[in-house]
Protein backbone atom coordinates (compact mmCIF):
# COMPACT_ATOMS: atom_id res chain seq x y z
CA UNK A 1 0.00 0.00 0.00
CA UNK A 2 2.90 2.35 0.72
CA UNK A 3 4.30 1.64 -2.74
CA UNK A 4 0.89 2.26 -4.33
CA UNK A 5 0.31 5.59 -2.59
CA UNK A 6 3.88 6.74 -3.25
CA UNK A 7 3.48 5.86 -6.93
CA UNK A 8 0.16 7.71 -7.10
CA UNK A 9 1.60 10.80 -5.39
CA UNK A 10 4.57 10.77 -7.78
CA UNK A 11 2.27 10.50 -10.80
CA UNK A 12 0.10 13.34 -9.49
CA UNK A 13 3.21 15.49 -9.11
CA UNK A 14 4.54 14.62 -12.59
CA UNK A 15 1.19 15.22 -14.28
CA UNK A 16 0.46 18.44 -12.43
CA UNK A 17 3.80 19.96 -11.45
CA UNK A 18 2.17 23.38 -11.18
CA UNK A 19 0.31 22.14 -8.05
CA UNK A 20 3.72 21.62 -6.36
CA UNK A 21 3.36 19.98 -2.89
CA UNK A 22 -0.45 20.06 -3.21
CA UNK A 23 -0.46 17.77 -6.26
CA UNK A 24 -1.92 14.72 -4.51
CA UNK A 25 -4.67 16.89 -3.00
CA UNK A 26 -5.61 18.76 -6.18
CA UNK A 27 -5.13 16.22 -8.98
CA UNK A 28 -8.35 14.88 -10.48
CA UNK A 29 -8.63 11.43 -11.98
CA UNK A 30 -9.87 7.88 -11.80
CA UNK A 31 -7.86 5.03 -10.29
CA UNK A 32 -8.74 1.34 -10.54
CA UNK A 33 -7.44 -0.98 -7.80
CA UNK A 34 -8.10 -4.70 -7.97
CA UNK A 35 -8.42 -6.44 -4.58
CA UNK A 36 -7.58 -3.39 -2.50
CA UNK A 37 -7.34 -5.57 0.63
CA UNK A 38 -4.54 -7.73 -0.76
CA UNK A 39 -1.74 -8.28 1.78
CA UNK A 40 -3.33 -5.94 4.34
CA UNK A 41 -4.03 -6.81 7.97
CA UNK A 42 -7.81 -6.71 8.67
CA UNK A 43 -7.40 -3.52 10.74
CA UNK A 44 -5.73 -1.81 7.77
CA UNK A 45 -8.44 -3.16 5.47
CA UNK A 46 -10.93 -1.14 7.52
CA UNK A 47 -8.87 2.03 6.98
CA UNK A 48 -7.63 1.73 3.41
CA UNK A 49 -10.51 3.51 1.64
CA UNK A 50 -10.62 6.44 4.08
CA UNK A 51 -6.84 6.79 3.87
CA UNK A 52 -6.86 6.85 0.07
CA UNK A 53 -9.68 9.41 0.05
CA UNK A 54 -7.81 11.66 2.50
CA UNK A 55 -4.57 11.46 0.53
CA UNK A 56 -6.23 11.92 -2.89
CA UNK A 57 -9.56 13.72 -2.31
CA UNK A 58 -10.21 14.59 -5.97
CA UNK A 59 -9.56 11.12 -7.33
CA UNK A 60 -12.40 8.68 -7.90
CA UNK A 61 -11.46 5.18 -6.83
CA UNK A 62 -13.01 2.11 -8.42
CA UNK A 63 -12.05 -0.85 -6.26
CA UNK A 64 -12.67 -4.56 -6.20
CA UNK A 65 -12.64 -6.49 -2.95
CA UNK A 66 -13.46 -9.83 -1.40
CA UNK A 67 -13.07 -8.42 2.10
CA UNK A 68 -16.01 -7.88 4.45
CA UNK A 69 -13.70 -5.55 6.43
CA UNK A 70 -13.45 -3.24 3.43
CA UNK A 71 -17.19 -3.46 2.72
CA UNK A 72 -18.08 -2.33 6.26
CA UNK A 73 -16.45 1.05 5.57
CA UNK A 74 -18.79 2.10 2.74
CA UNK A 75 -22.55 2.37 2.24
CA UNK A 76 -24.60 0.35 -0.21
CA UNK A 77 -24.71 3.21 -2.74
CA UNK A 78 -20.96 2.82 -3.26
CA UNK A 79 -21.08 -0.95 -3.84
CA UNK A 80 -21.91 -3.03 -6.88
CA UNK A 81 -22.25 -6.78 -6.53
CA UNK A 82 -21.35 -8.35 -9.85
CA UNK A 83 -22.64 -11.76 -10.85
CA UNK A 84 -23.48 -13.74 -13.94
CA UNK A 85 -27.04 -14.63 -14.85
CA UNK A 86 -27.20 -16.94 -17.86
CA UNK A 87 -25.20 -15.12 -20.57
CA UNK A 88 -25.37 -11.67 -18.96
CA UNK A 89 -23.29 -9.97 -16.30
CA UNK A 90 -25.33 -8.08 -13.71
CA UNK A 91 -24.07 -5.28 -11.42
CA UNK A 92 -26.43 -4.15 -8.69
CA UNK A 93 -26.42 -2.54 -5.28
CA UNK A 94 -26.68 -4.90 -2.34
CA UNK A 95 -29.95 -5.03 -0.42
CA UNK A 96 -28.28 -3.99 2.84
CA UNK A 97 -25.82 -1.24 3.70
CA UNK A 98 -22.76 -2.72 5.42
CA UNK A 99 -21.52 0.67 6.62
CA UNK A 100 -20.45 0.34 10.25
CA UNK A 101 -21.78 -3.21 10.53
CA UNK A 102 -19.93 -6.26 11.79
CA UNK A 103 -17.79 -8.00 9.18
CA UNK A 104 -19.81 -11.20 9.59
CA UNK A 105 -22.97 -9.32 8.61
CA UNK A 106 -21.30 -8.06 5.43
CA UNK A 107 -20.03 -11.55 4.73
CA UNK A 108 -23.54 -13.00 5.01
CA UNK A 109 -25.62 -10.10 3.70
CA UNK A 110 -23.51 -8.91 0.78
CA UNK A 111 -21.30 -11.83 -0.17
CA UNK A 112 -23.92 -14.47 0.69
CA UNK A 113 -21.42 -16.57 2.64
CA UNK A 114 -22.55 -18.13 5.92
CA UNK A 115 -20.85 -16.62 8.97
CA UNK A 116 -19.84 -20.10 10.08
CA UNK A 117 -18.10 -22.49 7.69
CA UNK A 118 -19.97 -25.50 6.36
CA UNK A 119 -17.83 -28.13 8.10
CA UNK A 120 -18.85 -31.06 10.33
CA UNK A 121 -17.83 -29.37 13.61
CA UNK A 122 -20.34 -26.59 12.89
CA UNK A 123 -23.16 -29.13 12.82
CA UNK A 124 -21.92 -30.55 16.13
CA UNK A 125 -21.80 -27.05 17.63
CA UNK A 126 -25.32 -26.29 16.41
CA UNK A 127 -26.64 -29.54 17.90
CA UNK A 128 -24.97 -28.82 21.24
CA UNK A 129 -26.28 -25.26 21.18
CA UNK A 130 -29.85 -26.53 20.90
CA UNK A 131 -29.41 -28.72 23.98
CA UNK A 132 -27.85 -25.82 25.90
CA UNK A 133 -30.59 -23.36 24.90
CA UNK A 134 -33.23 -25.84 26.04
CA UNK A 135 -31.51 -26.28 29.40
CA UNK A 136 -30.55 -29.85 28.55
CA UNK A 137 -26.74 -29.55 28.46
CA UNK A 138 -26.53 -32.24 31.17
CA UNK A 139 -28.15 -34.91 28.99
CA UNK A 140 -25.80 -37.73 27.89
CA UNK A 141 -26.14 -36.87 24.20
CA UNK A 142 -25.31 -33.21 24.91
CA UNK A 143 -22.27 -34.25 26.95
CA UNK A 144 -21.07 -36.42 24.04
CA UNK A 145 -21.41 -33.46 21.69
CA UNK A 146 -19.54 -31.19 24.12
CA UNK A 147 -16.74 -33.75 24.45
CA UNK A 148 -16.48 -33.90 20.65
CA UNK A 149 -16.27 -30.09 20.50
CA UNK A 150 -13.60 -30.01 23.20
CA UNK A 151 -11.56 -32.72 21.47
CA UNK A 152 -11.66 -30.78 18.19
CA UNK A 153 -10.53 -27.59 19.93
CA UNK A 154 -13.81 -25.77 19.34
CA UNK A 155 -14.35 -22.99 21.87
CA UNK A 156 -17.80 -21.66 22.62
CA UNK A 157 -17.62 -17.86 22.80
CA UNK A 158 -18.38 -16.62 26.32
CA UNK A 159 -21.17 -14.33 25.13
CA UNK A 160 -22.90 -17.26 23.39
CA UNK A 161 -22.61 -19.48 26.47
CA UNK A 162 -24.15 -16.69 28.57
CA UNK A 163 -26.98 -16.28 26.06
CA UNK A 164 -27.64 -20.02 26.06
CA UNK A 165 -27.74 -20.03 29.89
CA UNK A 166 -30.22 -17.17 29.84
CA UNK A 167 -32.42 -18.92 27.28
CA UNK A 168 -32.22 -22.17 29.25
CA UNK A 169 -33.40 -20.35 32.39
CA UNK A 170 -36.22 -18.78 30.40
CA UNK A 171 -37.20 -22.17 28.96
CA UNK A 172 -37.19 -23.65 32.47
CA UNK A 173 -39.40 -20.86 33.84
CA UNK A 174 -41.83 -21.41 30.95
CA UNK A 175 -42.09 -25.09 31.88
CA UNK A 176 -42.84 -24.20 35.51
CA UNK A 177 -45.63 -21.75 34.63
Image: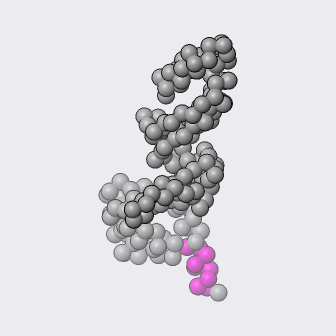
The picture places residue 107, in percent across and down from the top left corner, at 50, 55
User: Which of the colour schemes (rainbow, by chain, secondary structure, one colour) is used?
Assistant: one colour
Depth order, front residue of 66/45: 66
Q: Is residue 69 above or below residue 171?
A: above
- Residue furthest out toward the bottom: 177
The mark total stands at: 0
Left or right of 115? Residue 28 is right
Residue at image position (66%, 30%) is: 57
Q: Is residue 72 above or below residue 39?
A: below
Residue at image position (52%, 55%) is: 91
Depth order, front residue of 12/35: 12
Position of the C terminus, as image quadrant, is bottom right
Whether the magenta-drawn stretch holds residue 175 is answered as yes
Left or right of 165? Residue 39 is left
Q: Can residue 41 be seen in this view?
A: no
The picture places residue 117, in percent across and down from the top left corner, at 39, 59
Depth order, front residue of 126/142: 126
The picture places residue 64, in percent across and down from the top left corner, at 48, 43
Depth order, front residue of 18/118: 18
Residue at image position (55%, 73%) is: 168
The quarter of the displayed image where residue 106 is located: bottom right
Main SS category, magenta section:
helix
The quarter of the displayed image where residue 31 is located: top right
The picture places residue 94, in percent across and down from the top left corner, at 57, 58
What range is drawn magenta here?
168-176
Q: Can residue 66 be seen in this view?
A: yes
Residue at image position (58%, 56%) is: 93
Amino acid sequence: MISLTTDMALRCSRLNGHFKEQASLLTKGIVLIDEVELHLHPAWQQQVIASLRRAFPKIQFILSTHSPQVLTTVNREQIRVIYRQEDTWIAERPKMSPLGQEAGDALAGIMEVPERPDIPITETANAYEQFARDGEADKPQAKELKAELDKAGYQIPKIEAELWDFLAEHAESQKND
